[in-house]
Amino acid sequence: MVLVKDVYEIGEIPPVGVVPKEMYAQVIRPERFGEPKDAFQVEKVATPTELGPREALVMVMAAGINYNNIWAARGMPVNVIKAREKQGDTTGFHIGGSDASGVVQAVGSDVTSLQVGDEVVIHCGMWDENDASVTAGKDPVFSRSFQIWGYESNWGSFAQFTKVQAHQCMPKAKHLTWEEAAAPTLVGATAHRMLTNWAPNSVKKGDVVLIWGGSGGLGSMAIQIVRELGGIPVAVVSSEDKFAFCEKLGAKGCINRKDFDHWGMMPHWTDDEAYGKWAKGAREFGAKLWEVLGERRSPAIVFDHPGEDTIPTSIFVCDTGGMVVICAGTTGFNATVDLRYLWMRQKRLQGSHFANDEDANAFNQLVRDGKIDPCLGDTYTFNEIPLTHQLMSEGKQPLGVMAALVNAPREGMKDLG
């Protein structure tokens, strides 16, 4: 007979299928909104044991760190707790985390794709299966019910147990440790959709792809995906000491953005002097791209996520008929566009938001096949989750992606043994 404790300590792995009454979690509350180091605190809360028919409870072995819970910690641009209260959520707190590896501990009554004991990674796309858009066969990412688990939803991966929709669970790559497996899914699935979903502007053999933030989570995944699809990735980074990292992943070369100072919203087109200065900087950036390539070719796709600082230049350097695709705005949300470059050259500015099951599973298969390096920079403890977000918010995170151990008692474990 298995003795079930009311709560298990961090690093004390419960038996498979055992669900305690309580769990430890890194919790954000409205009164603590602010810098991530202050917003997160460890609390003991009730385990979310009530599962819907197609939900699953996963014991989190390790969790990946992403930018979305910096926003959650600050309560901006959206107060995620208040937003959920409008939908009837009465918890009053937020447990974030949108990447995880773990073990299925319980499943809902209608779940057939999972069994207790399955080792999984979790993608962060959630939606209402009864949404009219979904039942009509449309992409669930476009549905009004689409949410990001662990940001727009509660019960994310920064806890010993997490509640998810069963379709979010995918097989864990057996050759990866828990922390390696936990780290790349959000950024990888996001990048995969950005680069393959917007026909006809999908990466093809020989396409030049400019990738902002090449040494970060999104960028490191994008470089590898472009490489696997036969494209030519060029990375933009903030210092030359990041060049080798990107080139090892497959980048043709790199551009140091600190060599240029024209970033931000472009001046008004009627301000000849200011606009001329901006245009000179954009042309010099384009010339540097040609120098890195060794030929005068413009990128078929520009992979953007900084937003406010970079969109004007991204559109300027993008090839005729090409696409600038963006999934975030880490430098701000107001992006100016000189429409002359957009319409005369028939360029495309495309928004892209995470992924659907097909996108996520396609990326996960690349990981399982050993074609994608998770690019795990550093691994942290459960108690250091606030620190990881503070580092990311200050731009001091390691190259690649970060992960934190949760139930895994030590680094290097690939299973429960």
Image (spheres, rainbow, N blue to C red):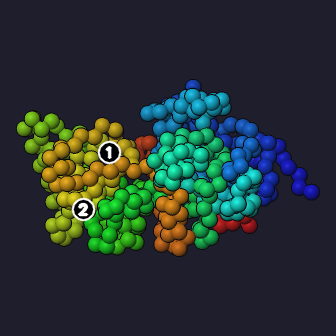
Q: Residue at x 55, y 50 (%)?
A: 135
Which quadrant does the C terminus fall into? bottom right
Q: Is residue 404 visible?
A: no
Residue 299 badge? 2
Three-letter code, disc 2: Pro
Which mark is first along the chain, 1 or 2? Answer: 2
Q: Secondary structure at mark 2?
A: loop
Residue 102 badge? none
Which quadrant does the N terminus fall into? bottom right
Q: Is residue 336 above or below residue 372?
A: above
Q: Residue at x 18, y 44 (%)?
A: 339
Query: Neighbour class for label 1 at 10 Å: few (<14), some, many (≥20)?
Result: many
Q: Secondary structure at mark 1?
A: loop
Q: Residue at x 51, y 31 (%)?
A: 79
Three-letter code, disc 1: Gly
Q: Is residue 358 visible?
A: yes
Q: CA distance from mark 2 to mark 1?
A: 17 Å
> As drawn, which residue projects farthest toward the front?
136
Query: Neighbour class for label 2 at 10 Å: few (<14), some, many (≥20)?
Result: many
Q: Position of residue 171 (x, y in %)?
A: 62, 65
Which residue, given by chain and number where applicable, does mark 1 sit on? 307
Question: Is residue 400 rendered to the left or right of residue 279?
Answer: right
Q: Position of residue 94 (x, y in %)?
A: 60, 36
Q: Is residue 106 above or below residue 77?
A: below
Q: Residue at x 27, y 47 (%)?
A: 310
Q: Position of residue 98 (x, y in %)?
A: 55, 49
